[in-house]
Image (cartoon, rainbow, N blue to C red):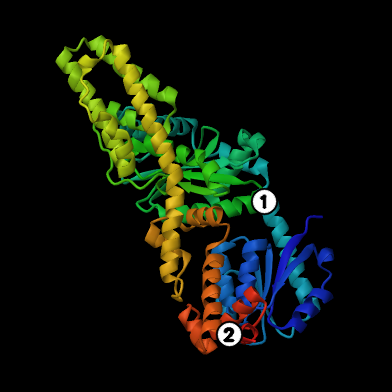
Amino acid sequence: MELYSVLLADDEEQIRVGISKKINWEELGFTLIGEAENGAEALELCEQLRPDVLLTDIKMPFMDGLELCRNLKQSLPTAKLIVFSGFDDFEYARQAVSNGVFEYIMKPINATELKDVLTRLRKKLDSERLEKRDMEALRHQYEESLPVLRELFYTRLLDGHIPNDEINQRALRFDIDISKGKWTTVLVRVNAQKALSYDELVLLSIRSFIEQHFQLDVSSLRTLIYNDMVTLLVQTEHIYPLIQEMQRLCYLVSSYLGINICVGIGRIYTAENLKFSAKEAQNALDTQILTGDTQVLYIGDIEPKQTARLSFDEQDMQALENAIKFGTQNDVSLFIETLMNRVRETRFTLAQCHLFFLEIITALVRIARSVGEDVEENFCKNFTNFVSISDFNSLNDLGDWLCSHCTNLQELLGQKRSDSASKTISKAKDFISCHFTESDISVDTLCDYLHLSSAYFSTLFKRETGKSFIAYVTELRMEMAANMLTQTDEKTYLIAEKIGYTDPNYFSYVFKKHFGLTPSKYRAGKRN
């Protein structure tokens, strides 16, 4: 029998021992995986162990049970919460229910009552899991959904196979309104389990699940199966709330369906340019090897920040940019060959060929400039000496020269993406060094400064430093506290304030957990 994991949080050891020993967990379908003596410790254990159920007291030091529930509602949305308290207060019960608490139990806790609650909870968990895994029900639901022609329209739109001037006309033919606002493409891929990636039932189940549980308030949401991936077309002006929503859905899909997914998100465009957003979302997924176990990847986080955006009206100039940024060397070669064939077919004069050549050179320079000055310096120096089309013996020689410089730019951009991660972490460390003594420093304030999503930054920071953001800040604070304890006669509560702790008791708790001694004993030991 599959057991559901339980975490118990209460500041009274006697109560924790009583509950853990009086309940036959396995008989009820559960297993007790951990205990916490305060709210802050419980939140940390929940993030590490990700239990199915949390039993928590309301009144605890450092973080009470209601605040703990509010935090877990976002970070662990699938967990079921059972709250108990010695305070017969309607307001506590009301707040508990508003935070999605499954049951509110009054102290002293009756073992029989707790068993009844756990029995009902087990039935609810079983029912939810069976419902989400019912592939046949999901297949039937899909067969009654959007017609095949709509799927084909969206697929051809993302592939760029519909001329821009025909998009609205074809959309209206299928009763689709896609002409208003701006859109982004979200690609959802089954991660690691290759056998599942091409299973239509699995893809349909993920699609249906996302449709049912997508909660972000957006103007419009369309879903389809595209290139063996679940694809979302989202009409919105705001990208970072979408990133957070997809992170939440990743956790839900993993918990309910037992499937690990990875999400790539492109930039926001008008409908006729959604093909570029789809390419960017695919490129974001392709960089997962650089970002470790990051589940949600936004192209704006991964690519180096651009100082200027390319905006060519000519379709060939836009295609050249995409071939260099998202394609392979073969893609570049094929596109350059297409340009050379156009010159051959149109029989341009030498002067016209030279202008066409200069337009291509200008496009390459602007692509280099769009991703940073160092790339521009390394790439554009190759054009220091003026190059004329008359310097080449044939169009084949010209095409080879262009291919060589395009692939060189591709390599520079690839290196730029790799270097971008280390530069971001260096900038983050500088910010932390300047602000770690401030009590309100957080991942969110740092990500606002870096203009990155918190999910992407947290994974990047852990990969580069080997520590979480909280652990890194705590270590800096503890080093400063230890130095002040040994070098000054400052009171402990003053030292706590100076390193960013508003609660001296919580500072002492963290200090002892870090060094194994209270601040006063640490000071005494260093001075003896």
Name the kind of residue labelled 2 in the image: Asn
x then y, percent, for residue 374: 33, 43
Mark closest to the chain's N terminus, 1 or 2 = 1
Q: Give the labeled residue for mark 1.
A: 131
On the question of residue 203 being in view, the answer is: yes
Q: Position of residue 12 (x, y in %)?
A: 71, 83
| Residue sitting at the far left | 351
Give the farthest residue toward the front. 528
Q: Splitting the image into 4 quarters, where does residue 77 fall?
A: bottom right
Q: Does residue 319 lie above or below 389 as drawn?
A: below
Closer-to-camera residue (377/48): 377
- Give neighbour class at mark 2: few <14, some 14-19, many 20+ (Cα, 10 Å): some
- Callout 1 environment at 10 Å: few (<14), some (14 to 19), or many (20+)? some
Q: Is residue 209 left or right of residue 31?
A: left
On the image, numbered disc 2 is attached to which residue?
Answer: 505
- Establish if 321 lies above or below 495: above
Q: Residue at x 74, y 82 (%)?
A: 13
Alpha-carbon span between mark 1 and mark 2: 46 Å
Relative horizontal placement of residue 391, taking residue 230 as reference (left or right): left
Instruction: Give the residue displayed 39% in from the left and 39% down from the top.
Output: 277
In percent of width and height, residue 69 lies at 58, 71
Q: Is residue 349 above or below residue 206?
A: above
